[in-house]
Amino acid sequence: QKEVEQDPGPLSVPEGAIVSLNCTYSNSAFQYFMWYRQYSRKGPELLMYTYSSGNKEDGRFTAQVDKSSKYISLFIRDSQPSDSATYLCAMSLTGGGNKLTFGTGTQLKVEL
Amino acid sequence: NAGVTQTPKFQVLKTGQSMTLQCAQDMNHNSMYWYRQDPGMGLRLIYYSASEGTTDKGEVPNGYNVSRLNKREFSLRLESAAPSQTSVYFCASREAQGQGSAQYFGPGTRLLVL
């Protein structure tokens, strides 16, 4: 079993929809949680960064962490075709060089 | 700021050839990382450098070596390339002030080993 599980998709939604992307993890020691967006043939781009449990909002994006369930989510409101990309979740422990453990990514397509 | 830059963008090697992938960052970050990305496997850490002068193995270090040349630059060397090293390689950096700042990635190097 992988340490971080993420549904690979593809997930196809109409423009304007609310998108929910999720990851589950097995290591309860993870403290820092990130979402990256990766366009085709590009490097991952940091979208959201959260520490421990709770919600964080940035524009159309909301990151949610539930440490008790070992579950993190990224919500995208009013989705746009420009949101079409692969979304990677990542998490790390405290210290240890801040090595990140990644999910395999969910491919999202927002259609007109 | 250019952020994290990588050269070359694309490379084709024959089995047994050697090459060095270059990475530089202009954000004055302390920590730097090398990952490989393969379909269905996600991003896997090859080596990292927590600070200038130190390097450590990640999840998949076999077949690779690294050099932290200075605070800005972190190179990845393949001494004898194998087809299993065909992948997309990403370099990343992190400020490392405190415990949990996020990593910032370069655009990647696509490597094909024949």
Image (cartoon, coloured by chain):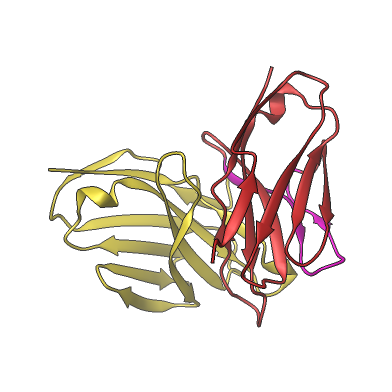
**Quadrant location of residue A40?**
top left
Q: Is residue A73 above or below residue A31?
A: above
Please report the residue visible at 50 percent of the width from the left and 49 percent of the height from the top.
A43
Q: Which one is nearer the viewer's eye here, A73 or A82?
A: A82
- Indicate the position of residue B107 as horizontal and vertical percent values: 54, 48
Q: Is residue A108 above or below residue B1?
A: above
Question: Is A105 covered by the magenta stretch?
Answer: no
Please report the residue visible at 36 percent of the width from the left and 62 percent of the height from the top.
A73
What quarter of the picture does the C terminus of chain A occupy? Answer: top left
Q: Which segment did they paint magenta?
A: B42-60
Task: Point out the residue furthest to the bottom here.
Answer: B98
Question: Is B54 covered by the magenta stretch?
Answer: yes
Q: Which one is nearer the viewer's eye here, A112 or A89?
A: A112
- Indicate the position of residue A59 as horizontal and vertical percent values: 26, 72
Chain assigned red = B
Name chain A's colour.
Answer: yellow
Counting the numbered discs, the total is: 0
Please report the residue visible at 72 percent of the width from the left and 71 percent of the height from the top.
B30
Regarding residue B6, the answer to whether it shows in the image is yes
Regarding residue A68, the answer to whether it shows in the image is no
- Indicate the position of residue B70 as horizontal and vertical percent values: 81, 64
Please report the residue visible at 46 percent of the width from the left and 74 percent of the height from the top.
A50
What quarter of the picture does the N terminus of chain A occupy? Answer: top right
- Indicate the position of residue B24 as horizontal and vertical percent values: 68, 57
